Image (cartoon, rainbow, N blue to C red):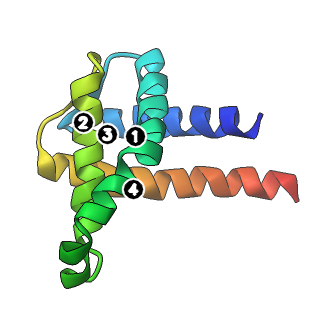
Amino acid sequence: MNVIIKLLLNAIAVFVLAEILNGVSVDNYITSLIVAVVLSILNVLVKPILVILTLPVTILTLGLFLFVVNALIILLADRLIDGFRVDGIWTAILFSVLLCILQSLLHSFLKKDKK
């Protein structure tokens, strides 16, 4: 049940950011839910491989290259989903950072409800 709530919160975050950012668009809420699911799957399956492959660059940049890895995951989701569009790498980096912040805020509200 907790996973479903987190996916719904992530879908809300994707939808809100698509409305705010100029270079990101989502057709409807169902598409944002699909984006949240695909991003979760890509973060579990593909991101660890990319992190291991780019470990030397990540160490040299003191971890800042992980922003690029996150942007690549978002651009991969853009390729996989028809109703989701991201204009470029810089938009994907900005979307990634803002999505992380918004997800943290939304998930913190979820943790407060449990206490």
Q: Answer whether labels 1 and 2 touch (C-beta < 8 Å).
A: yes
- Residue 94 seen: no
Q: Which mark is residue 48?
A: 4
**N-terminal of the two: label 3 or label 2?**
3
* Separation of marks 4 and 1 at Cα, in angstroms: 9 Å
What residue does disc 1 label? 42
**N-terminal of the two: label 4 or label 2?**
4
Q: Which mark is residue 105?
A: none
Question: Disc 4 residue type?
Answer: Pro
Q: Quadrant of residue 19?
A: top left
From what the image shows, is residue 62 above or below residue 30?
below
Q: Secondary structure at mark 3?
A: helix
* Separation of marks 3 and 2 at Cα, in angstroms: 21 Å
Question: Disc 3 residue type?
Answer: Ile
Q: Quadrant of residue 66?
A: bottom left
* Separation of marks 4 and 2 at Cα, in angstroms: 15 Å
Q: Residue at x 18, y 74 (%)?
A: 57
What residue does disc 2 label? 76
Q: Answer whether labels 3 and 2 touch (C-beta < 8 Å).
A: no
What residue does disc 3 label? 20
Q: In the rendering, at what x and y percent does residue 47 appear?
A: 36, 51
Q: Quadrant of residue 93?
A: bottom left
